[in-house]
Every structure is written in C-alpha cells, then in structure tokens.
C-alpha cells in the first residue's frame, strides 16, 4: 500500500525497518476492518491526522495492520500489531530537520543529487532516516542512523524520464 516504500538488505535493517517493505501478502482493506485497538491507538496518538487508507499484511506469520495518514504537511504510515501495539512509524520530513550528520552524509554521497523523499523511521528506541535521491538516471534509497552512518543502500532503480 503506502507508498510503503522501505526495503531492506541486511538482517539488522530487516529487523529495524523490514516491516515497512511492500509485502506480497499486503492488501488494502476497508478501515472499518481494522481492529478497534489499532484505531484507538492511532486516534489517541494522532488526533488531528486524516486517515488516507488502511492495509493488512502478514509479517513473520503474524497479521499486522497499517494506517496511512496525513497531518498538515506530514505523511505518516504506522504499522500495528492486532492489539494496537505500534511496530514502526514512518513520517515524511523536511530534509533540514534531519540531524546535521545525516544531512551532511547524504549531501556528501550525492552532491548533485535531488532528494525526492526524506523520512524518519521510528521503531522502539531506534530512529533512522531514509532518503530517496535522484542521481543522474537512477533512484537511490539510503538509510542512515542519527550519526550519519549508512545502514542500508538500495541503488540502481531506473528513473523514468
């Protein structure tokens, strides 16, 4: 669903943000079909958000639910366990709000690249930053920790002209 756009390579990243990758089992569902506990947790945490869609998928044998929303300029995708416990939150951010080491790292890697997406990914106490960068004719996806260390990189996706 979402521009559920995160995709992972290494086991650590799979654990950290793997639940955000598009899953073969993911399917859009009516938001009325999402468990009440998921709705309650979402509306309590984000009372001003407008829900744009809902999805259900199977991750590691467990059914989980995703709510995609918008609040002001912030796009947000939240993945939940059936009982309403949050698994991961992904929020669009302005590049300038990422920590300085992260901004420096992405600009050093792609000084002439165009950042088309910046997101903050929060899972438990872990915070990561993902950038989608158009570099020449390819689209690069890079995930950094808050110190600017690259923790995942997916490259080579052709960009349509």
Image: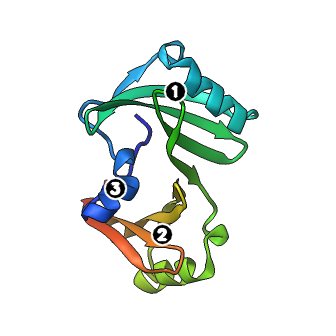
First in sequence: mark 3 vs mark 2: 3
Q: Which mark is residue 53?
A: 1
Q: Disc 3 versus disc 2: distance between alpha carbons? A: 28 Å
Residue closest to the eye, 34 or 101 = 34
Q: Residue at x 44, y 38 (%)?
A: 2
Q: Given contact means CB atoms under 8 Å apart, are the residues at marks 2 and 1 in contact? A: no
* Mark 2 or mark 1, whichever is nearer to me: 1
Residue 128 in sight? yes
Circle 3: element type? helix
Circle 1: element type? strand
Residue closest to the eye, 56 or 105 = 56
Q: Which residue is mark 3?
A: 15
Rendered view: 160 above or below 49? below
Q: Disc 1 versus disc 3: distance between alpha carbons? A: 24 Å
Rendered view: 122 above or below 55? below
* Mark 3 or mark 2, whichever is nearer to me: 3
Residue closest to the eye, 139 or 144 = 144
Circle 2: element type? strand
Please, which residue is most extreme toward the top here?
Answer: 32
Q: Position of residue 7 (x, y in %)?
A: 32, 54
Q: Disc 2 versus disc 1: distance between alpha carbons? A: 28 Å
Q: Residue at x 32, y 41 (%)?
A: 22
Q: Which mark is residue 114?
A: 2
């Amino acid at each position: 669903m979402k521009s559920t756009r995160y995709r992972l390579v290494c086991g650590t990243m799979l654990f950290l943000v793997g639940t955000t990758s598009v899953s073969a089992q993911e399917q859009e569902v009516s938001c009325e079909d999402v468990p009440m506990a998921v709705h309650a947790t979402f509306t309590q945490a984000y009372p001003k958000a407008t829900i744009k869609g809902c999805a259900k998928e199977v991750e590691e044998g467990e059914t989980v639910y995703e709510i995609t929303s918008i609040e002001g300029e912030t796009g947000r995708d939240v993945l939940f366990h059936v009982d309403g416990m949050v698994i991961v939150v992904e929020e669009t951010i302005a590049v300038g709000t990422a920590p300085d080491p992260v901004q420096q790292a992405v600009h050093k890697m792609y000084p002439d690249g165009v950042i088309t997406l910046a997101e903050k990914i929060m899972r438990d106490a872990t915070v990561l930053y993902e950038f989608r960068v158009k570099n020449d004719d390819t689209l690069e996806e890079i995930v950094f920790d808050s110190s600017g260390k690259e923790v995942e990189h997916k490259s080579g996706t052709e960009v349509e002209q």
